Amino acid sequence: MNFDFSEEQNLLREQARRFLSENAAGKARNILEGDDPFDRDLWRGMAELGWMGTVIPEEYGGIGLTHEDLCVLAEEIGRSLAPTPFSSSSYLATEALLLAGSDDQKSNCLPQIASGDVIGCFAVTEGIKKPGPENIETVFANGKLTGEKHPVADGDVANFAIVLARTPEGEPVLTITLLDDVASETMETVDPSRSHGRLRFDDTPAGLLGNIGDGWVLTERLLDRAAVLFAFEQVGGAQQCLEMAVDYAKNRFAFGRPIGSFQAIKHKLADVFIATELARSHAYYGAWALSTDAPDLPVAAAAARVAASRAFYLASSENIQTHGGMGFTWELDCHLYYRRAKLLNLALGGERRWKHKLVSRLENRNAAA
C-alpha cells in the first residue's frame, strides 16, 4: 500500500514552501520582539492562497480539497514557524463545524473562515485539570454560557469559539459563540509567537453544536483529527531542526575538521533522523486514516501524536546542542523551534495523555479482534 503523497500534492508542497520561505522567514522572531499577537500580513497572504478553505466544501466558500492536502500545508507551516492562528481556525474550529454544525451554522461561519475574515478557536481546557466530562465546569443553560476557559490557543484574537461545556444536569455539550463581548486576556506561554488567551463567559449567548450529551464524544473525535494535523506540523519542525543542525555541523570547524565528523555529533543527528522518519511514517498513515475516515483513525492519530511530539522535542533540543554555546543565544533561531516544540507537545493534551490513549485503544482493538 502506498501512503506517499501524489504529484499534485508535492507540487502544493513546493508552492507552500516557496511562499513561506519568502513571507514567513523571521516572522516568529518579530512577534516575540513586538506587540502583535500574530502576523496579519502573512495571514492575509495565506487567505489569498485559499489555505483556510482547504477542506471547506465549495458550497461554503472553500476549495474542497482533501485532508491530505491540508496535511501538506501543516508540515510546511511547521517548518517555517508561521506565527498565525491557522491551526485554531483550520484544524479545530473548521473541523468542529464540519463534524457537528447545522447547515445554518456552516453557512454563517465557513465562508468567513475560508476568506480569512474571521478566526475561530477551540476552548476545552479549564486550567491544569485533566480534560474530561467529569471536569467540565463551564455551564450551558437557556442558550447562554457561564464559566472560564484557559489557556485557549488564539483565544485572545479569535472572533468566535467552539466551547466544551455541560448542561445543568451534567451532560457534555459543544457550543458555538461569538467573542465580541467576551472578556479575554492574553496569557504568557513558552512560545509567544502562538498567542493564547483566557476567556470568561458571563451569560454569553451561544448555540448548540450537535446534540446534548454528545459533547465529549465529539471532542474526542475532533482531537483525533487535529492530532494528525499537529503531527505534521511537528514533523515539519523536526525536519527543519535536523537540516539546521546538519548544515551547522558541516560548516563549523574544531581542531581543524568539521564537527560533523566527530562521532558524538554523528550519533546525535542519526538519532534525530531516525525519530523524525518514524514520526513521518506514523503521520503519513494518520493522513490516510483521516482522509478516508478509516476505523483505524483513533489509533493512527494517537501513534502519530506520540511519535511526532518525541521527534520534534528531540530534534529541537539536539539542534541547540549541536550549535554549542551559540545555540543558547537569542540571536540564533534554535530557541524558536524549541519553544514551538514544547508548546505543540501540550497543544491537545500532553504526550503522556496520548500514550495512555494509544495503549488503551490498542488494547480495545485487540480485545475486539
Image (spheres, rainbow, N blue to C red):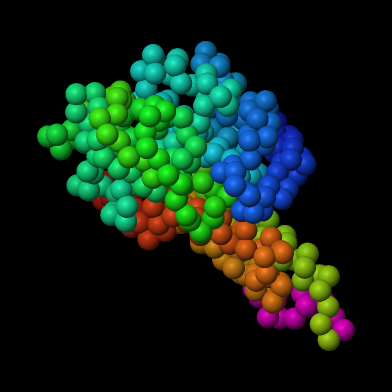
Q: Residue at x 18, y 33 (%)?
A: 167
Q: Quadrant of residue 18?
A: top right
Asked whether residue 191 is in view, the answer is: yes
Q: Position of residue 271 (x, y in %)?
A: 61, 69
Asked whether residue 284 is in view, the answer is: no
User: Is 126 colored magenta in this rendering?
Assistant: no
Residue 61 higher or lower than 160, as above or below: above
Main secondary structure of the magenta stretch: helix
Q: Nearer the viewer, residue 116 or 247?
A: 116
Q: Position of residue 194 (x, y in %)?
A: 54, 48
Report the span colored magenta.
256-268
Q: Quadrant of residue 261?
A: bottom right
Q: Residue at x 44, y 55 (%)?
A: 346
Q: Position of residue 46 (x, y in %)?
A: 65, 32
Taking the view exactly as shown, the residue that stands out farthest to the right is 256
User: Is 257 colored magenta in this rendering?
Assistant: yes
Q: Residue at x 42, y 28 (%)?
A: 180
Q: How many marks?
A: 0
Q: Nearer the viewer, residue 117 or 242?
A: 117
Query: On the rendered structure, is 255 left or right of 106?
Result: right
Residue 141 higher or lower than 334, as above or below: above
Q: Position of residue 8 (x, y in %)?
A: 70, 31
Q: Residue at x 32, y 40 (%)?
A: 200
